Structures are given as C-alpha cells and as structure tokens.
Amino acid sequence: MKKKRGKKFKLIVGGVAAAVVVVGVVIGVRMIRAKNASPAGAVKQSTTTLTKMDLTDSISASGTIESKKTRSVTAQVNDVTVQKIYVKVGDEVKKGDKLVSFDSDSLSESLSEAQDSLQDVQSSAASEVESAQEQYDTAVSDRNYNNAKAAKNLQKAVKARDTAKKAVKTAKTKLKQVKKKAGAKNSQDVTTAQEALTKAQEAYEQAKTAVETARDNKNDTARQNKSSVTQAQTALKNAQTNRKKNVKEAQKQVTSAQEAVAKCAVTAPMDGVVTSLNVSAGDTYTGGTIVQLDDTSGYTITTSVDEYDISNVKKGQRVVILTEATDEDELEGVVTFVAPSTGSTSTTTSASSGNGADAGNSSSDGYEVRIRIKTTDSRIKMGMTAKCSIVRDEAKDVFAVPYDAVSENADGTYYITVVDGSGSSTGYTTQSGDNSQDSSDNSGQSGDSGQRGKMGNPPGQDETNASDDSTKGTAKTRQIAVTKGMETDYYVEISGDDLEEGLEVVMPTDKVSDKSSSSDSQSGFGSMNGMGGGMPDSGGMGGSGSKGGFGGGPGGGK
C-alpha cells in the first residue's frame, strides 16, 4: 500500500510541480508586460502624417458623348432623281462643299420658260406704259391748245364789246349834235341819227353777250382739258404700276426656278463630319434627311441629375471627365445648361451624389444637365460613355486629415492632437496622409496571437517589423488649434498657425488599460483567458477570472 501511496504521491507532486512551472511562466510574462505597459487609462495612439493635398467634392454622373452641333441636311425639292453623291460616311466637309446633286433637266426647262415669260411681260408692260404716256402727252397738249384758243376767243369778244360800246357813245354824240341844229327836230337827219344809235346799242348788247359766252367757253374748256389730263395721268400711273407688278411676279418665277435648279446641288451648311448618308445615286428623292453632319470640333455630354443633387449643380461649374478611351487622363469640362424642371432628357443617362463615387442608376425623371468638353483629344469619339464628376467645391494644396482626427472643444473651437517630442513609436503607428482606411486600434491579435506566441503588430506594420523593445516609452502629445474648412466624405481641410508638414496627427481610439480584455489578446496569450481566479485566498495568484490575470495582491484575488 505504501508503494501505491508513494506512486500516487509522486503523481500529485509532479502535477503540482507542473502547475507551478506554468504559473511561473505566466507570472514572468505578466511582469514583462507590466514593465512595458502604459499607465492605466492611457490612450492608444494611431497616427497619420500631416501633408498637403488637393480636395474635391463632386457629384458623379454619366452620359454619352455627342457632337456640340448636329444638322440634318434636307433638300427643298421633291420627286427628283439623285444624280451624284460627293461624300461618304466619315468624310470631313467644310461649309459650302457639295454633298449630293439631283437631275435638274426638268427644272432647267422650267427656268427657261420662266425667263421667256419674264421677257414677254417686260415687253408688254413697256408697251402699255408707252401708250399711256402718249395719251397723257396728247391730253396735256390738247389742254394747252384748247385753253389758249378759248382765251383768245374771249379776248376777241371783249374787244368787240369795247368797240360796240364806243359806237354807242359816238351815235349818242351825233344824235345830240343833229338835234341842236335849228329846225331839225323832225328832220330826216334826226331820224337817221336815232336809228344809228339804236343799232349801236344793239351791237353793244350782242358784244357783251359774246364776251360772257367766250368766258364760259374758256372755263368749260379748262375743266374738260383738266379732266382729260387727269385721266391720262391716272392711266399712265396704272400702266407703270402694272408693269412693275407683272415684271416682279415674272421675276419671282424666274428666281424660284433658279433656286430650284440651285437646290439640285445640296451643300454643307456647316463644317463637320458626315455621320449618316440616306440616299444613293439613282434614287428618287421624296423628302427627308439626306445627310447628317456633326460638328466634331467640340463635344458635349447630356446627363440627368436627381432632385437630391440638382440644387448643387450650376451653369459654369467645372467638370472632370473620364472615358475608357482616354484611360486615366482627365478631361476638363464645364456645365453649360441645367434644366429648370424635370422632363424628357436628350439621352438615357444616370447620375448620383458622392465625392467621386460611381454614378449608379438614377430616376428617369431627373433634371437634364449638359456639359461641354473643353479638352481637345483625338481619342474622343461620339457615342462613348463618359463618367463625369461635377465639382461642387475644391481646395488645392491644403492641409487635410481624416474627419475623425479633428476634435471639438466645449466652446465650439476645434483642435487636433499631434505627437510631441521624440517619443517611441511603441503604442502608435503611422499612416500615409492619403490612406482612407480607418486607423483604429488593430494591434491586438487575439486567439491566434496567443498561438503564435508573438506580440500583436501595429496597424500598417508587417509582422516582421513589429517591435517588442521594452526600453521604448510612450510618445507625448499636444493639441493644436485649427479651423475647419472644406469637407469630403473622409477628409476635412484644416488650417492653423502651428501646422506644418510631417506632424504625426493622433487618431482617437478606445481607451485600453492592463485590465482590458484586449490586453490579454495583444499579449499573445489570449488563449489562456480564464486561467486566473482559480486559487483565491492563496496569495499572489488571484485576479479576475474574467481577465485570466495573475496580478492580484496576496490573498486579494482581485
């Protein structure tokens, strides 16, 4: 029985010895950790290097590249035969270059007839005007002659009246003289003198009547001649007006025929490239587009922006454009039109908000936006898909940090925390200034770290570069007052008198102490959690069972 007890005792002693060895190893590790650990409540420091960069806040959209101007060329003639085609698809043409010609034989015949008709009208109208002119001239001549004749007749009548008047006066005088002779009152001389006076008076009355008649004739002749001249003058004006009207109408027919002949040669209305040709030689043209020309001296993009973003899109905004053909070469563009309301768009496109993010699908009832490509590049072709970034705001060569690196004071001012002095890199890591990945505490390697038996690596470091130099201390930090500027989804612009390139800006993370569960994970013994606390009141080996620690005070177990 002693032999068995001895064997059992040896087993117990061996087990206790093994336990002591394990406890010793753990206590040793805890002592090393305690030596290197930061004070309780210390903040784990993950940093990013402060550099200057360009920031851009944009709205993404996509659309199809189009020429800046398109013209559908038609002809103003119908039912004519296509005689010759001078271009093919892809040809570059200048304004005025011939594109297509039609058979103009029938139109040329119509032109000849119109020209003959014009000559006839001109000749006939000229004859009518000439005749009217002659009639007018005759009327004027007759008026002048008749008026002069009537005036002369009146003049004669007046002269005859005056002569008759004198004769009456003479007869009266003679009668008085005869009567004065003594004894001659009843003589034949008195009778004769009296008869002479009577005749003279009768002649005078007739002369006066002749004057009135001559005067009336003169007035009537003047009125008649005036009417004749007026009528002749009106006829002449009408002939001249008709000639002008008829000749103009005939000339119009000639011009129309000439234009029809000219229209048989269709020319380019602008410089451009032939992008479609819809007729062939021998076809009968009955209307419609013959050739489509596109002005490829410039290109546009039509896209659609949804109502969430459209208020941030303005005419004149800069646009950055990418295409597969131009690879990573950015093209410059500018917004030239923003629709005032929703409605039909010129192309089927999509757009969405974001700081350079992919566009995605947008509603078909978005707002049409047109963009002019300012960059000249021979690789640009119509029909290509373009990804556009409509720049809302941008800042060049400014200090910027991840948004979470900026903290706010109670008074509303802002600051950043930077590494001060020459402290060790232990406990913090450095990110490049343009790294968009979060730099929160990733140094612990729970579970697997314990199996590897190595300390967890700082974020951004390779495992082989991880440091376990226990002689390094924790870096000191200080705060720098900053003013916030432009913001993007990840970065925020900052400015301040104390900023300079190369500063290590601290990224805030969770507080970690030697009592945290992550401490054990980072120690490389995460797989041993829960080992402590199994021997309370035994002194020196207590600790929280939940933490797996061995650091409790003698008999404390805490």
Image: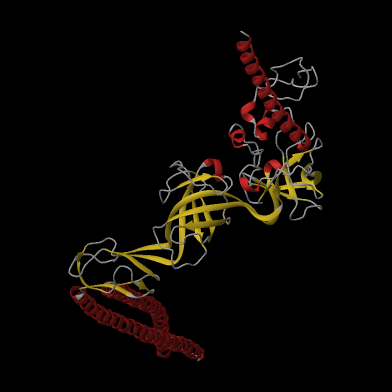
User: Compared to 261, does 510 lie above or below?
Assistant: above
Q: Residue at x 57, y 47 (%)?
A: 355
The quarter of the image holding the C terminus is top right
Which picture quadrant has residue 412?
A: top right
Q: Nearer the viewer, residue 57 or 282?
A: 57
- Left or right of residue 229: residue 547: right
Which picture quadrant has residue 236?
A: bottom left
- Left or right of residue 515: residue 331: left
Q: Residue at x 50, y 43 (%)?
A: 306
User: Compared to 423, does 158 lie above or below?
Assistant: below
Residue 140 % position (x, y): 36, 83
Residue 411 % position (x, y): 82, 37
Q: Residue at x 58, y 45 (%)?
A: 311
- Left or right of residue 286: residue 335: right
Residue 545 % position (x, y): 69, 20
The quarter of the image holding the N terminus is top right
Residue 327 % position (x, y): 47, 60
Q: How is the image coloured?
A: secondary structure
Q: Residue at x 64, y 20 (%)?
A: 15
- For the image, the number of numbered tags is 0
